[in-house]
Amino acid sequence: MKVWKILAGMYITLLGPILAGILNSVWCRSKAMKCLQIPMDGGKNFADGRRIFGDNKTWKGFLGYIVLNMICMVLWGAVCRGTGIEAYNLFYQGAENTFGNNLVIGLLLGLAYGLFELPNSFVKRRLGIVPGKSINGCLKAFFVFFDQADSVFGCVLVVCLYAPITVGFYFLYVVVGAVTHIVINMLLYVMRLRKNMF
């Protein structure tokens, strides 16, 4: 298969969560539903005396990932339905492109997106990295990449539930997704929808 077809398939498959991630940045910055702006760790510390996840991991953001992924998958499924691009969407190798299936796929993607960000936040708090910031020094590039790759690992696992993909393809998906995430975060920062670029 040609490289452009592989890349096109990746973006067509995960356009829903890409859009949901962008919309969630807008949602989290909005003043709506401030009652959900509660840290997921309840403000509690781990045994080392540092926060478990930090203030940036809130229920508002987590629920936003879920609801917005469900909405985006339903809308993207409607766009794909009956067109040539539907064949490139890996979710539709294992499920029909229906409203109900897209809701379930969106739910799984939202959960994966949100949950797979938590271990990274946990590790960063243990290292004393301030929420929303990255580490300085030689490990900065690694943490910048991993910050953007964590949610992609989860989303591509959801893809694996619907289409058989190789280990190599899985990691290629993660790399392409992480690079895309970095570019989008740079754009969101320029548009003042993110506090920090990385």
Image (spheres, grey):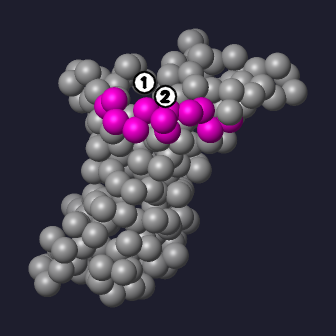
Query: Can you see residue 115?
Result: yes
The numbered dot on residue 60 is none
Q: Which residues fall within the magenta stretch?
A: 30-41
Query: Which residue is at 75% across, 28% downward?
Result: 44
Query: Which residue is at 59% across, 16% downward?
Result: 130
Q: Which residue is mark 1?
A: 198
Residue nearest the viewer, comparing 36 with 25:
36
> Where residue 146 appears, x then y in whole percent?
53, 37
* CB within 8 Å, label 2 to label 1: yes
Horizontally, is 132 left or right of 19 in the view? right
Quadrant (top left, top right, bottom left, bottom right) of the N terminus: bottom left
Query: Which residue is at 58% across, 26% downward?
Result: 55
Query: Which residue is at 34% across, 29% downward?
Result: 31
Q: Residue placed farthest to the left in the image?
A: 83
Q: Amino acid at mark 2?
A: Val
Query: What crowding class fits label 1: few (fewer than 14 Cα within 10 Å), some (14-19), or many (20 or more)?
Result: some
Q: Earlier in the sequence, mark 2 or mark 1?
A: 2
Q: Which residue is mark 2?
A: 144
Quadrant (top left, top right, bottom left, bottom right) of the C terminus: top left
